Amino acid sequence: MESAIQTEVVTLIEKGIAEGHTYQEYRVQVSELLKENKSTGAQQSEALTNYSMLNDRRMKRLDKTLKIDEAIIEQFKNAKTNITWLVLTEGWCGDAAQSMPVINKLAEANDGIELKVVSRDAHDDLMSQFLTNGGKAIPKLIAYNKDTKEIVNSWGPRPSEATKMVNDYKAAHGALDPEFKESLQVWYNKDKGRNIADDLSKLL
C-alpha cells in the first residue's frame, strides 16, 4: 500500500513539473492577471486581488534589491546536485511573496537546481500530500530528484524563525490576527531573506 501511495505522489509531482512555470513566467502570469483585476487561484475576490497587487510590488522590489549572504551563494554554487524545486504557491500569499525571490536567486546559483512553480489550487491533489498541520499552507517547496524519483526534502510555508513566531502567537492568542500578520511582514522586511536562505541551504 505504501509503495502505491508513493507512486501516486511521484506521478503528481512529475505532472506538476511538466505543467510548471519558470519563476519569470510565474511573475508575468501574476502581473497579467492583475491587469484584469484577478489573482491566481480558483477563488477571486477584491481582497485577494489587493493582496496580489501588494505582493507583486514586493516581489518586484525584492527581485531588484535582494542580497543573499555570499557564503550561502558559494555553498549553492559548489553543491553537486541534480534536483527540481517544485513550488506550490499563489499570487495572493504574503509569505510566498517574501520567499519566492529568495528561492529563485538560490536556484539560479546552481545549474543543478531546476525551479518550477505551480498554482496550489490547480494542483490540489499534490497539495493534499504536503499539508502543514492539516492545512494547505503555501508556499510549499518540494525538492525532487527526477533521476531516482525520490522526494529529497520539502520546505515551507514559512522560514523557521517566522514559524516559531506564528506558533508562539497561536499558543498565546489562539489565532493569527491582522496585527500579527502586519508584524510578521515587518519581520520579513528586516530579515531580508536571511532566514529563508539559511533554511534552504540545509536542503542541499
Image (cartoon, rainbow, N blue to C red):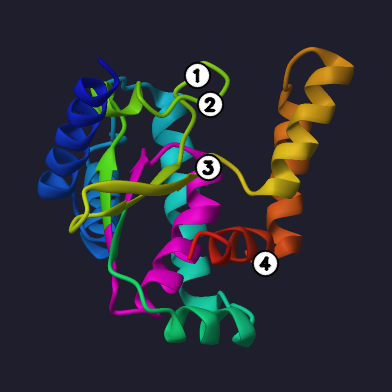
Residue 178 position within the rendered picture, expressed as x and y whole percent measured from the top left:
71, 26
Q: Secondary structure at mark 4?
A: helix
Between 56 and 152, the residue placed more toward the observer is 152
Going by the numbered disc 4, the residue's amino acid type is: Arg
Q: Is residue 100 left or right of residue 6?
A: right
Vertical comparison of 182 with 145: above or below: above
Mark closest to the chain's N terminus, 1 or 4? 1
Question: Residue 169 at what x, y percent from top left?
Answer: 82, 26
Q: Quadrant of the N terminus?
A: top left
Q: How far apart are the two marked residues, 2 and 4, measured between alpha carbons?
A: 22 Å
Tell me if label 3 and label 2 are in contact, CB under 8 Å. yes
User: Is label 1 in contact with label 4 (beta carbons under 8 Å)?
Assistant: no
The disc placed on residue 194 is 4
Q: Amino acid at mark 3?
A: Gly
N-terminal label among 1 and 3: 1
Residue 156: which disc?
3
The amino acid on which the numbered mark 2 sits, given as a three-letter code, is Thr
Point 72% across, 44% down: residue = 162
196 lies left or right of 52: right
Residue with the mark numbered 2: 132
Label 1, label 4: how far apart the Cα atoms are = 26 Å
Please tell me whether residue 157 is drawn above or below residue 68 in the rendered image.
above
Q: Are marks 2 and 1 in contact (CB under 8 Å)?
A: yes
Q: Which residues are magenta?
A: 86-115
Q: Quadrant of residue 190?
A: bottom right
Indicate yes or no whether the magenta region holds residue 102.
yes
Furthest-right residue in view? 172
Query: Observer-nearest residue: 99 or 29?
Result: 99
